[in-house]
Image (tube, grey):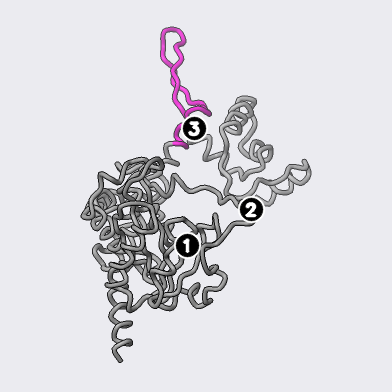
Amino acid sequence: MKEVFVLMQEQSITPRPKGHHLSEIERGQIAAWHIEGCSARQIAIRLGVCHQTVNNELKRGRVTQVKRVNNQKHYFEIYSPEAAQNRYEIKRQNCGRPLKFSQLTAFLAYFDDKFCHEGWSPDAAVGYARKHRLFKPAKMVCTKTLYNYIDAQLLEIRNLDLLEKTKRRTTQHHSHQHQRLLGRSIEERPKRVETRHEFGHFEIDTVIGKRAGSESVLLTFTERKTRYEIVRLIEGKDAESVAYAMQNITAEFGDVMRTVTADNGTEFTTLTAALEGVAETYYAHPYSSAERATNEVHNRILRRYFPKGQSLDLATPSLARQAESRLNHLPRRLLKFCTPAEVFRKELARARKGCAA
């Protein structure tokens, strides 16, 4: 090898990076030089590889041919770059760590059920299974591998079924000036609300079906720390309907409510009055849905059950409750794969115990 390196230096040939495989073009060059009568060492010098690499390649591409001379068959061997390339590609397909797909039947059936019937994401299914030790480590895969299976179309679930994955796009920033706020600005909201360390801070919004006409809408009320979602079907997108729904919600949870953050929709014009003596009300900046990000994410998930453009007059309070239950029983990575319902119950009990004391 030292002799080869010296010859390469003398002929100003740059050594190839270690570990690089021969290309299809280089195999063609080997065939041409081999026909010319060049030795393996001479070919190695020209390619910038070890002579043993050329020896191995000549063996890999060896094929037997037949030539008839004077009605007699003569067998001889030649180097075929096509045969060598074909054998190389076959071996490459079989190299690497094999898929343990055949060992995952139970786990993949579990994931398919959770995804199709309960709306769980791949991450939620993997995280929940790992947290509760539903499968042995060798009998399941991580979130990244599960997404790889979907990308490779190894499952019936496709990328088109992953609503969040296909809809995400780069955030665009727009400037909107001189917009009126309905009440106290979110800038006045206590900084501790942003940390999510304290229970009892909520975000509120409405989800519509059709844009045109007057019809039922969904009122969504999200607790920031636990991600617990309250969903109510109300008669319309107006202040009176919102105020009536809030009376029922405050009757149930008013004792633990600290703040409520809303957008500047006209349906929230009387929200401050409706929550007077119960919780402080703040309004996000216009066109700044990111200031109520938790609520907005939940609204997108709700769209799986109430598609945009479909009239909510066809919905029922029971359907709204079912959607609420699905959201609240979806394991979240942010909650260490507990569900919002589990965390909310604990926080609610702790808060009410503190109030009683």
Q: Are marks 2 and 3 in contact (CB under 8 Å)?
A: no
Residue at the image point whose x is 55% and y is 62% from the top: 181
Q: Earlier in the sequence, mark 1 or mark 3?
A: 3
From what the image shows, is residue 247 above or below residue 41?
Answer: below
Q: Amino acid at mark 3?
A: Ala
Q: Earlier in the sequence, mark 2 or mark 3?
A: 3
- From the viewer's side, name the closer residue of 349 and 144: 349
Q: Is residue 323 left or right of residue 15?
A: left
Residue 175: assigned label: 2
Residue at the image point whose x is 23% and y is 55% from the top: 317
Residue at the image point whose x is 33% and y is 41% from the top: 310
Q: Amino acid at mark 2?
A: Ser
Q: Nearer the viewer, mark 2 or mark 3?
A: 2
Residue 331 visible in image? no
Mark 1 Cα-neighbour bin, 10 Å: few <14, some 14–19, many ≥20:
many
Q: Secondary structure at mark 2?
A: loop
